[in-house]
């Protein structure tokens, strides 16, 4: 298998943590889209959102995703909103297996409790704001080859679920 595994999901669902473990297990490279955007732009995602706006950020995100997915044998952790654009979802599906990680709004709120690096939740980190964003993005997150609920699971369990899926011939 030389395709990519692309992890999608809301912030706090474990994409980066699970992605690193999967990459080590499969001997794939790990690519974190948000980290690559920060590196390319030379500023934090919060600063990009504040200075240039979400639409600029989404343009950069799409550009970096296209560049990353030109290669294979990678685990790619996307940002929570990368699935919003249809061209991004098409690119992901054409470049590998799309795995959506899910978690309940309550668990997400717990996981993001002290995280201030989430521009879409700045100043409104509440259960209601998380529920609204999840609802707004549900159709996009559902457009995956497999969805895995991370509630009550450790990183190894989630990675094992993905590996089992891949071994069945995703």
Image (cartoon, rainbow, N blue to C red):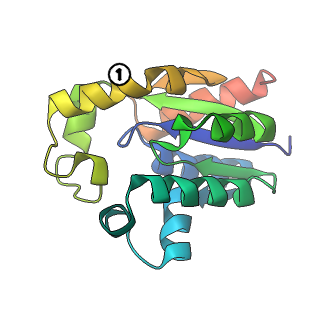
In which quarter of the view is residue 142 placed? top right
Which residue is outermost to the right? 1
Q: Position of residue 12 (x, y in %)?
A: 35, 42
Count neighbours of disc 1 (C-alpha within 10 A) and say few if under 14, some if 14 to 19, many if 20 or more.
few
Q: Position of residue 153 (x, y in %)?
A: 39, 29
- Name the residue: 53% across, 66% down: 37
Q: Nearer the viewer, residue 113 or 41?
A: 41
Which residue is outermost to the bottom? 42
Q: Which residue is mark 1?
A: 135
Q: Please indicate whether residue 50 sits to the left or right of residue 157 in the image.
A: left
Q: Nearer the viewer, residue 146 or 154?
A: 146
Q: Position of residue 87 (x, y in %)?
A: 68, 39
Q: Nearer the viewer, residue 146 or 82?
A: 82
Residue 28 in view (yes/no): no
Quadrant including the C terminus: top right
User: Does 134 appear above or below 95?
Assistant: above
Q: Position of residue 130 (x, y in %)?
A: 25, 32
Q: Please indicate whether residue 158 sits to the left or right of residue 135 in the image.
A: right
- Name the residue: 30% across, 24% down: 104
Q: How many marks?
A: 1
- Name the residue: 43% across, 42% down: 14
Question: SS for tag 1?
Answer: helix
Quadrant including the N terminus: top right
- Name the residue: 25% across, 42% down: 111
Residue 43 in view (yes/no): yes
User: Does 24 appear above or below 9?
Assistant: below
């Amino acid at each position: 298998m030389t395709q990519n595994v692309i992890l999608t999901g809301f912030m706090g669902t474990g994409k980066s943590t699970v992605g690193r473990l999967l990459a080590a297990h499969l001997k794939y490279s790990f690519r974190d889209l948000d980290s690559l955007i920060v590196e390319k732009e030379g500023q934090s995602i919060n600063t990009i959102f504040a200075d240039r706006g979400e639409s600029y950020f989404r343009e950069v995100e799409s550009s970096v995703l296209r560049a990353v997915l030109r290669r294979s044998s990678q685990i790619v952790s996307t940002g929570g909103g990368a699935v919003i654009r249809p061209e991004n979802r098409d690119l992901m599906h054409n470049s590998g297996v799309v795995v959506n990680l899910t978690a309940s709004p309550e668990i997400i709120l717990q996981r993001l409790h002290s995280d201030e690096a989430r521009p879409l939740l700045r100043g409104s980190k509440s259960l209601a704001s998380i529920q609204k964003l999840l609802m707004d993005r549900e159709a996009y997150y559902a457009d995956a080859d497999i969805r895995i609920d991370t509630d009550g699971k450790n990183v190894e369990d989630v990675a094992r679920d993905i590996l089992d899926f891949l071994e069945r011939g995703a």
